[in-house]
Image (cartoon, rainbow, N blue to C red):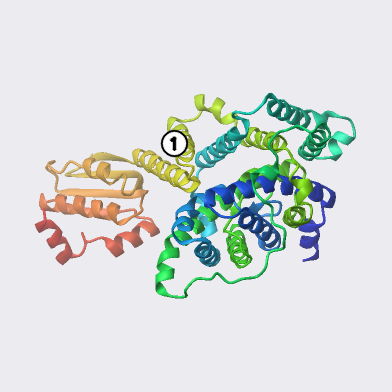
Amino acid sequence: MTDTLKREWFSNIRGDVLSGTVVALALIPEAIAFSIIAGVDPKVGLYASFCIAVIISFLGGRPGMISAATGAMALLMVTLVKEHGLEYLLAASLLCGVFQIIAGYLKLGTLMRFVSRSVVTGFVNALAILIFMAQLPELTNVTWHVYAMTAAGLGIIYLFPYIPVIGKSLPSPLVCIVALTAFAMMVGLDIRTVGDMGDLPDSLPIFLLPDVPLNFETLMIILPYSLGLAVVGLLESMMTATIVDELTDTTSDRNRECKGQGVANIGSSLLGGMAGCAMIGQSVINIKSGGRGRLSTLFAGVLLLVMVVFLDDLIGQIPMAALVAVMIMVSIGTFSWDSIINLKHHPMSTNVVMLATVAIVVATHNLALGVFAGVLLASLFFANKIGRFMVVKSENVDQGTTYKVVGQVFFASSEKFNDAFDFKEAVSHVTIDLSQAHFWDITAVSALDKVVIKFRREGATVDVIGMNEATETVVDKFGVHNKPEEAEKLLNGH
């Protein structure tokens, strides 16, 4: 217990504090922007980011991962806020947290093993594109000063680490924000700042229950939104955990993360914040700035609140160009550039899954929809591939024929299995050897039933041999060819 506490909290204090500072600064404009997307006051997103980051730092299953208000969640809230108002959003966020806790106890986090590598790559690339696209409004119809500041920020971010000694001591994104802010204030540049995005809160959040009627009608209003928020939130959090696992070469507890996200969203709603989830962009900033432990997430959340409440005048002076430079760095670092080169080497099915995931996410701005489409395509390609590997070999023996089945027999290969048998062949005995085959589902069992019964209808005796234990179990349970009454029904049906 002590070793775990030390490793997760105090093994990288300096790196976690500095990276947490960078994350806190980058969270402010994003939280305000996501609040605007959802149609609520900026403080709703800021309070949510503070609360979720603090709670997840203690309860989350992935040290170093940043959770806060996100754009993917905000997009799902627009209609609810427009039609019913903020209080219903808070209630929906609370119910969303309950669903996520239930998902954690049901161990739904383990479902991530069904997400293929090509889907993860597509998700990452799409998110990198969306992060870059989100910066374009800040670079459109602006003066040359903004472009110069953004270019200077990127120069600091990528060149500062090469400075001897100090370059490795301070995170370059933090140096970029501080340096450009100081320069803009000294010169008096008239460019867009964080303060121009909306009013920062001037007080700490207070505990309040959502002011909605506690009845069935309210439940029916918020239920669809809560389910959508829960699914999207968990999906983005699990995908982000996978990325951070790879960046840090460590593992995470996904089911604990589900529960932690649930508690965080309940806490956020009770403090006047909206639901949120893990943020891949901020998590990458944290990792690339040296953050590794839970302290980085806690410090980012606490510092965020301290800055927006007590240092609002100073924070409001940060030029958006500095934060745009940081987010462009995140976009470049997040995108899997190898995936472009690998298009020539990877199988076509893998490329289709990756590109489809990217296209759907970018077109809809819905991460969940893109991932679901990618998983569905990957599953279909996999089923088709495995189905093609199933073969049936025939061999004439005396007055009979032996059919040897090799491979996996399931819904995708059952039709090929049926077509492999010659029912018009004049034989008195047929042996079906399944010693090198595996039957997976009732579709496969039904195919076997039809083959056996058709041969019997042609006057041949049929023996099915070599079934492994799993195949024998599913055939005994669902098969009818050895059950006279059921076989007769099937025979009459043909």
Q: Is residue 438 left or right of residue 124?
A: left
Question: 424 or 20, which lies in front?
Answer: 20
> In terms of image quadrants, where is residue 148?
top right
Q: Looking at the picture, does residue 127 appear above or below residue 27? A: above
User: What is the x, y in percent for residue 415?
Assistant: 25, 44
- Counting every numbered tag in the picture gives 1
Q: Is residue 159 left or right of residue 430?
A: right
Amino acid of disc 1: Ala
> From this viewpoint, is residue 97 visible?
yes
Residue farthest along the right direction in this orientation: 165
Residue at point 28%, 53% (across, down): 443
Q: Looking at the picture, does residue 325 appear above or below residue 487? A: above
User: What is the x, y in percent for residue 298?
Assistant: 74, 57
Quadrant occupied by the N terminus: bottom right
Residue at point 70%, 30% (across, down): 150
User: What is the x, y in percent for residue 302?
Assistant: 75, 57
Residue at point 21%, 62% (across, down): 482
> From this viewpoint, is residue 249 visible?
no
Question: Dot 1 corresponds to which residue?
Answer: 356
> In terms of image quadrants, where is residue 348?
top left
Q: Residues within 10 Å of mark 1 (few under 14, many from 20)?
A: many
Q: Looking at the picture, does residue 420 appear above or below residue 462? A: above
Residue at point 85%, 34% (across, down): 167
Question: 454 or 402, which lies in front?
Answer: 454
Q: Secondary structure at mark 1?
A: helix
User: What is the x, y in percent for residue 195?
Assistant: 70, 45
